[in-house]
């Protein structure tokens, strides 16, 4: 008679642990880990913020295309690392998700047979990109409903709308404003700030015009488009208000927004608008009141409502009057918090 194996009954905790592992495995098969690919040159702006928030929130690895594959990783910003791969090694990776693409990387599209691609705004819809989208090789994700509608109605391309994924970066502890104050006192939120790129679609000139009439002008930060500065700002006192770029870290972002009462963003993009941008979401997270361009919310479906969860101005005069009046923003800020919920959940990503 052969040896008999004594079967030891599992405890409740062991059974629970095994079920949890099965559930986790089932979930990972349902939602496999994505390999993010940043196929663009800009190192500042919305594309960069989007990629960083998604990588941090979902713990997805990030890659960039290079002439040669490197074993080391490099700093991307916001606590995210990336690895350079040549295109032949990259296409071997499963579940590629292209977070952004510009003309410098169109040449690689034919080699990527299957992937998911994110379209942020209409400026990205150049012929090489449209050709790939129409081929149906790529799954298309849009992060604003206006862009989803444009792709469907104008180009006949089906896409999936998902809310911008938002990583809830930690807020720093309150700091004293000066050595004379109590160490536990909170920073006063009394500044107005702009953190967008200084560019044509950001209409920074509106802020500069308003600043010339304001006793407490808007501090302007952000990467410069030199062509825009030359054509639109060279004959203005722009340099008086420009504070430069800030480090690509969440700590730097927190330091800037901690004392900001208003975050001014005059973005307006043709055939786009209504939805969110990372400057909006980061401002709301840091308890700042948003001031938006009327062209961003006019005539489109939008959750942004003037005087309810943000402020909307039409021009420099409107911006000047709003900031000069310095309204109490407590309720507007509280209402805006509700808009963060779908972005924090990260559903679909």
Image (cartoon, rainbow, N blue to C red):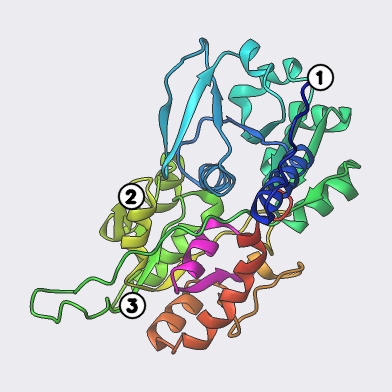
Q: Position of residue 34 (x, y in %)?
A: 67, 35
Q: Position of residue 33 (x, y in %)?
A: 67, 36
- Answer yes or no: is residue 313 visible: no
- Residue 282 located within the stretch drawn in magenta: yes
Q: Nearer the viewer, mark 1 or mark 3?
A: 1
Which label's residue is closer to the chain start, 2 or 3? 3
Asked which secondary structure carries label 2, the reply is loop
Which residue is drawn at the image coordinates 38% and 45% (left, top)? 248
Kindly report the distance in space between the C-alpha atoms of the residues bearing marks 2 and 1: 74 Å
Q: Position of residue 281 (x, y in %)?
A: 54, 63
Q: Which residue is mark 1?
A: 2
Q: Position of residue 292 (x, y in %)?
A: 55, 69
Residue nearer the viewer, 181 or 132: 181
Q: Which residue is mark 3?
A: 189
Query: Where 95 sits versus 57, above or below?
Result: above
Which label number is shown at residue 246? 2
Kindly report the distance in space between the C-alpha atoms of the residues bearing marks 1 and 3: 79 Å
Q: Are marks 2 and 1 in contact (CB under 8 Å)?
A: no
**Residue 12 figure quarter:** bottom right
Magenta region: 276-294
Which residue is drawn at the image coordinates 33% and 49% (left, top)? 246
Residue nearer the viewer, 204 or 180: 180
């Amino acid at each position: 008679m052969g040896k008999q194996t004594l079967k030891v009954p599992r405890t409740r905790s062991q059974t629970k642990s095994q079920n949890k592992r099965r559930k986790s495995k089932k979930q990972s098969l349902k939602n496999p880990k994505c390999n993010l690919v940043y196929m663009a040159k800009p190192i500042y702006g919305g594309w960069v913020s989007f990629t960083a928030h998604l990588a941090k929130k979902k713990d997805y690895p990030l890659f960039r295309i290079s002439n040669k594959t490197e074993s080391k990783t490099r700093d991307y910003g916001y606590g995210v690392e990336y690895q350079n791969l040549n295109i032949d090694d990259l296409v071997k990776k499963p579940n590629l998700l292209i977070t952004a693409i510009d003309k410098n990387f169109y040449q690689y599209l034919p080699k990527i047979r299957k992937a998911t691609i994110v379209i942020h705004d209409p400026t990205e819809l150049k012929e090489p990109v449209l050709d790939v989208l129409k081929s149906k090789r790529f799954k298309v994700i849009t992060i604003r409903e206006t862009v989803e509608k444009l792709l469907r109605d104008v180009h006949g391309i089906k896409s999936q709308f998902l809310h911008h994924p938002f990583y809830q970066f930690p807020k720093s502890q309150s700091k004293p404003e000066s050595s004379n104050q109590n160490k536990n006192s909170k920073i006063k939120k009394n500044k107005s700030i702009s953190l967008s790129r200084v560019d044509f679609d950001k209409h920074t000139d509106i802020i500069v015009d308003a600043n010339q009439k304001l006793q407490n002008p808007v501090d302007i930060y952000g990467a410069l488009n030199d062509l825009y500065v030359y054509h639109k700002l060279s004959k203005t006192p722009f340099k008086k208000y420009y504070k430069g770029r800030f480090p690509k870290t969440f700590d730097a972002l927190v330091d800037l927004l901690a004392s900001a009462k208003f975050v001014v963003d005059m973005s307006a993009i043709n055939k786009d608008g209504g939805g969110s941008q990372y400057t909006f979401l980061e401002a709301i997270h840091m308890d700042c009141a948003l001031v938006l361009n009327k062209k961003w919310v006019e005539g489109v479906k939008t959750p942004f409502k003037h005087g309810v969860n943000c402020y909307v101005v039409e021009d420099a005069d409107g911006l000047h009057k709003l900031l000069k009046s310095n309204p109490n923003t407590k309720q507007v800020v509280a209402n805006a918090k509700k808009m963060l919920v779908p972005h924090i959940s990260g559903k679909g990503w």
